[in-house]
Amino acid sequence: MPIRWTISHPERLVLVACEGPLTRADIESYLDGIVVDGAMPYRKLFELTDATLGLVDGDMMALGARIQAYVRTMPDGMGPLAIVAPTDGHREHAQMFTALAVGPRQVKIFSDTPAARKWLDSFTVGS
């Protein structure tokens, strides 16, 4: 599976690792999984380093609309999101996602995992 994630309920943290070709269906499956597990309000570290992104504009727009729907319907909101995007291509997709998935939450793009984790750790566990 191109997306693997681990949820720590005590830490209210989701660690996501993407590997190989990544599709809209993969991201939708991940989103479904964290919604079912009650982890949408948790802090998330989304690691793209080993991913190959084949998402087209239509995919990005659909994912952005889905996130906006979550924002409107999730009673506990959505937790902060750190996206690790080390290449220009990764950053381009991450920037498009953040522009389309507008909502009342913190989102930041990083080029390395330690900086992303440090930023996420600055949020209290209850946020």
Image (spheres, rainbow, N blue to C red):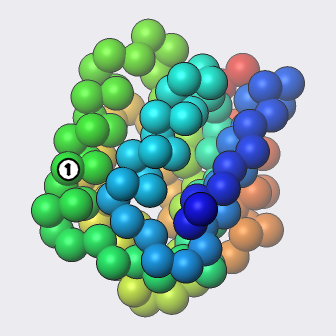
Residue type at numbered disc 1 = Ala
Q: Is residue 19 left or right of residue 29?
A: right
Residue at the far left in the pictured view = 58
Quadrant in which the N terminus is drawn:
bottom right
* Numbered-mark total: 1
Residue 48 position (above or below residue 81): below
Give 108 or 25, whichever is nearer the viewer. 25
Image quadrant where residue 85 sits = bottom right
Q: Is residue 75 left or right of residue 48?
A: left
Q: Is residue 41 in view? A: no
What residue lies at 44% left-to-right and 10% top-to-bottom? 75
Residue 11 position (above or below residue 112): above
Q: Is residue 114 in view? A: yes
Residue 47 position (above or below residue 38): below
**Neighbour class for label 1 at 10 Å: few (<14), some, many (≥20)?**
some
Q: In the structure shown, which secondary structural element does the residue marked by tag 1 occupy?
A: helix
From the image, tell me which residue sits under label 1: 62
Give 25 or 35, whichever is nearer the viewer. 25
